[in-house]
Amino acid sequence: MITLRDYQEDIASRAVSVIETHGMVYLSMEVRTGKTLTSLAICQRLGASQVLFLTKKKAISSIEGDYKLLAPDYDITVINYESLHKLPKTKWDIIVCDEAHGMGAFPKPSKRAKQVRDLFFSTRAKAILLSGTPTPESYSQIYHQIYGIPGNPFEKYKNFYRWADDYVNVTLKYLGYAQVKDYSGAISTKVLGAIKPFTISYTQKQAGFESSIDEEVVTIDISEDIHRVVRRLKRDFVVEGSEEVILADTGAKMMQKCHQLYSGTIIFESGNTKILDTSKAEWIKKTFPDKKIGIFYKFKAEYDAIVQVLGKENVTQDIEEFNTKSQYIALQIVSGREGISLRNAEYLVFYNIDFSATSYWQARDRMTTKDRQFNKVYWLFSRGGIEKDIYKAVTKKKDYTLRHFKLDHLSL
């Protein structure tokens, strides 16, 4: 069995009181402070019989491991959100929604948010929501995370638009030639005031974390052929080969294709992929011949390049396999940025960078633990590429958008 830290015990006690009063609690606990274990302990204290834990696929084994270590009296089903349609009809006492901000799309709810809403409606279960970043881009993201939970603070509103009448400063913005309403301007004081009775927040600093993250940008020289392809693509919007075509007939496509090319891979118009340059993977192999490394990549073909250079027998995408035997773990940024711990990695290496600021702040923190004093993160950017410009934006907590790309690379 495992015991909770003092602050986790305190949060669990407070959360029980909140749930008994409101039927739900939102644990806004920063990464590595123990959201999962705390939520499992809350279920035990509430005397649950059947618990459903919704999470990402890569986090399932870790959560099941925590459940076994805690050894509570209740039964648990741990499932990824994409498999909700496979759930049996069970009377869940408590539903835990991990990385709940993933349901925050607006003004229309996502498929995931609708499925979770229907689940709460049919079971009337109590709710525990977990996230280190409940509203990473806008306070408007809170509505669809909780709108299906009985007793939630916005229960009287028929939909997001009626909620926005009271909670959002709606403005107008231009999309191409069309003028549309922008619902991202939720009034922070009103939103925070409404959800405060339902929320328990906790930071790494409060938990006693003293670790620091040192980031180093490494500039990689890639093939001149790639630079020639990019220049031609910017000029002609298309590059035709004997069998395949690279098409960038819109600004969004141009940004995506340049992003792919500068890291040495391409997705053709046909959907086929090709590795064009393995310089980044070669740098990893040369720099870390005997170190245990966590690698984040963006495009699937980048994973193929990593495996080609580092060897299939040395690279895994399974956290348990990495912890026990593999030298490298390679994870796609968006799927690997949440819900897993890379505490056994000696260093993190980002093969590429995502346009999302959320991805930047979450993924770089995957090695952090309470006892780890220092984390080293490497960013591999191609000389002359767009990665450095993306990095400048996301480190300032701004997503890298098409507007940024046009200013940085299409106005030259």
Image (cartoon, rainbow, N blue to C red):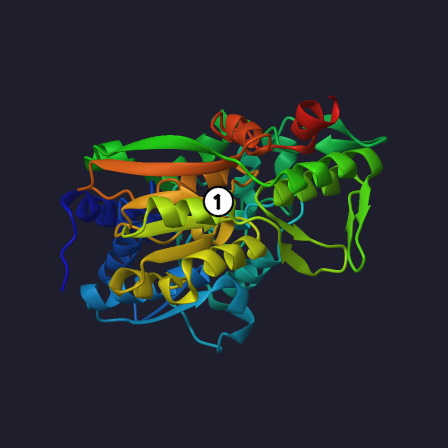
Q: Which residue lies furthest to the front in this view?
A: 224
Height in image: 178 above or below 264? above
**Residue 60 as seen in the image, left or right of residue 34:** right
Residue type, numbered disc 1: Lys
Give the residue displayed 42% in from the left and 44% down from the top: 283
**For this rendering, which residue is in front, 285 or 200?**
285
Height in image: 112 above or below 169? below
**For this rendering, which residue is in front, 7 or 156?**
7
**For this rendering, which residue is in front, 336 or 121?**
336
Disc 1 crowd rating (10 Å Cα; few below 14, some 14-19, many 20+) is: many
Q: Residue 247: x and y, percent?
A: 79, 47
Q: How many labels does the image show?
A: 1
**Residue 359 as seen in the image, left or right of residue 169:** left
Q: Residue 382: x and y, percent?
A: 54, 36
**Residue 294 as seen in the image, left or right of residue 219:** left
Q: In which quarter of the image is residue 113?
A: bottom right
Q: Residue 292: x and y, percent?
A: 29, 52
Secondary element under disc 1, as helix, strand or loop, is: helix
**What residue does disc 1 label?**
280
Tell me, yes or no, if residue 22 can be seen here. no
**Residue 195 as seen in the image, left or right of residue 182:** left
Q: Residue 17: x and y, percent?
A: 27, 48
Give the residue displayed 59% in from the left and 46% down from the top: 264
Tell me, yes or no, if residue 332 can be seen here. yes
Height in image: 184 above or below 299? above
Give the residue displayed 77% in from the left and 34% down from the top: 234
Q: Specify the quadrant that holds the C terminus.
A: top right
Q: Specify the quadrant that holds the N terminus.
A: bottom left
Height in image: 217 above or below 134? above
Give the residue displayed 22% in from the left and 59% down from the top: 45
